[in-house]
Image (cartoon, helix red, strand yellow):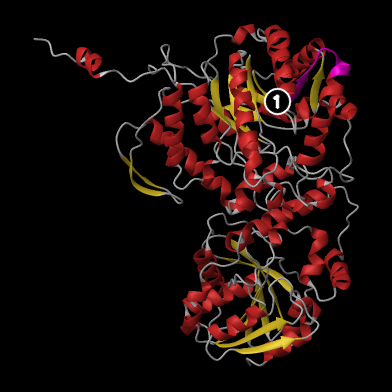
Amino acid sequence: MELKTVQTHHVPVRCLEGGSGPDLVFLHGAGGVTADDPLLAELARTHTVHAPLIPGYGDSDEAPEIRDMLDFTLHTWDVVAALGLKDPILVGHSMGGMIAAEMAAIAPNDVSRLALIAPAGLWDDEHPIADLFATLPYEMPELLFHDAAAGAAMMTAGRDVTDPNFLQTYLVTNARQLGMAGRILFPIPERGLQQRLYRIKARTVIVWGDSDRLIPPVYAHAFKKGIAGAELVSIPEAGHMITLEKPALVAEAIGRLG
Amino acid sequence: MKFTWFNLMPWPYLPDDFRETHRSVWVDIDQKLFDPVKSHEVYNTYMDLLEYADTLGFDGVGVNEHHQNGYGIMPSPNIIAAGLARRTKDAAVVVLGNSIALYNPPVRVAEEFAMLDCISGGRLVAGFPVGTSMDTNYCYGQIPSLTREKYQEAHDLIIKAWTTREPFAFNGRYNKLRHVNIWPRPIQQPHPPVHIPGGGSVETYDFCIDNTYSYSYLSFSGYLRAQALMNGYWKRVEERGVDKSPYRAGFAQTILVADTDEEAERLYSEHVSYFYNRCLHVYPGFADAPGYRTIKTIQTGALSQYAPPTGGYTQLTWKELTEQGHVIAGSPETVRQRMEDLIKGLNVGNIFCLMHVGNMPADKCMYSTKLFAEKVMPKLRNMFPDWADDNRFWTTPLKDRVTAGALPKQAPTREELARTYAVEA
């Protein structure tokens, strides 16, 4: 995966690119995405993968003027245009799935293939989604992974927690990334998508881990119900970070879109 | 010097094992711990104490806003302030303050503060905090990284509403109002003095300097730990080339006075322990929503005072709390000395005296308050003679104020009324 920069109306956007085959745009979740992401590697075997970073993620510039759901949706369409793509396979995980669904709902004729991996965007009072913004780092693995111990190892890999600057770097990164994510996820990760789902025309695959404790699988059925003809692929022994836990199976499910 | 008697209004009935059995005093505090029947006495006692402070010559009586909080049962400080505006005579009513980003629309604050200023005869000090992350983000659902922008807009709207003499349209991002025309408006001109409670956000320094507002550092960790932050403020004041009037700054300090140092420990240590070891037990996940603080502020190392100390919580002792300056306690002379150190060291003219602490009962609180008012306060009055006339940061009350509750005991008779309103022939 290579990191490149494309110019958009608001800010320069950083974008991971790699692989060959049909164009595929991957929108990351609130935790961001890195060049060594195993799902991107899987997808790049059969697709040309474009994974733009939301402003504020990684080393990308912040975009204070992107404030609400419509801003995020249109900005991401700007990114697709800046990448020179037309009707790419649109894939999104978690927050990225929420944005991808909004993009497909707002411009239904421009998205013919859509993959939503444990997307945010709906809310069910009977099944409240945990407050990610009040979750401490050590509590994350239990919430995000089927195998919490293995998840904890993945989350801390490559981080030197003994570095005195670690805490400050961590806080700055969190403020930039989750601060931005909070604009569409805080305090409830729902911005009206339910009433727009009917507009989606794309052939849609919904991928969900059976052990997702952040956005429980009951939401998979709500998405399936809301999007005409959507297909649900449930994956056992996978949590919300299914992209890290079962990348090959996720890629295989997305592969059904061609 | 301006001394404001301040009460956070803690709930005094948190169980002994609160910290072990509950995760947070704030946001998701256990509903079962609040007893509405008991609160009847708690509220009225706390308001009585504020009124008592007025009779002892404190310059102000202070209230603040917290939500879903076991150490501050005052989600609406304006309700308490309304009682104080009526029942106090001379003290400024210091509302520190209203979290203006939470009011929809914020003209509500302009109106309520105007009412308080009118009822009190121009005794209102208006505080505009951004609000803690617990209150603003976790309890009231504001988006963390947009909170400051919304706060700024609310501030601009309130000041404009106070100072504009004709209806105007306000096309904000968060407030769209075609007809802003608050009625009533405040007595104090151009508007009541504004104090901004800050917790180390560097942007707030400039905001205060630009608008001639007083910067108030409301910390519970005492004056020794506040030195670095206040130095940063004064450095900025100097850089900006404005005067260094001590009234540009305020500081909150827990103060407890007794006859001797030993008596202070004997009388107050359990209540201090209750506050520092029980009331401040906040789940760290609620301490600072990502995006609430600006990157610049995080980079200066100003972290939430609610985050657990490195190494985790320990039981803070009386000795640690007094020696480290969290609490200034002891005989009048001990307290005077330490207050002098605080006032000179931080260069602060406004002191928010936290004289009720934790689960302190009213009799002890009155005892301590009276000793401070009579034996300490007079000796600290003239710390800044060069700035004695600086009234930019304090109230300008009406000279002739009515006495609340001064109606005659009896309604007039028909005959008396006829005489009063007799038409001149």
Queried whether the magenta region covers residue B71, the answer comes back as no
Subunit ID for the residue under disc 1: B
Q: Position of residue B414 (x, y in %)?
A: 23, 19
How many dots with numbers? Answer: 1
A151 relative to A68, above or below: below
Where is mark 1, residue-wise?
A: B362
The segment highlighted magenta reads B254-263
Q: Position of residue A195 (x, y in %)?
A: 48, 75
- Residue at the image point whose x is 75% and y is 46% from the top: B282
Indicate left or right for A129 with A192 as reference.
Answer: right
Residue drawn at x 76%, y 74% as measured from the top left = A241
Q: Is residue A21 visible?
A: no
Instruction: Compare residues A47 and B106 and report the one nearer the observer.
Output: B106
In which quadrant of the rendered view does residue B188 lie? top left
Q: Residues within 10 Å of mark 1 (few under 14, many from 20)?
A: some
Across and down, in percent, residue B412 comes to: 30, 18
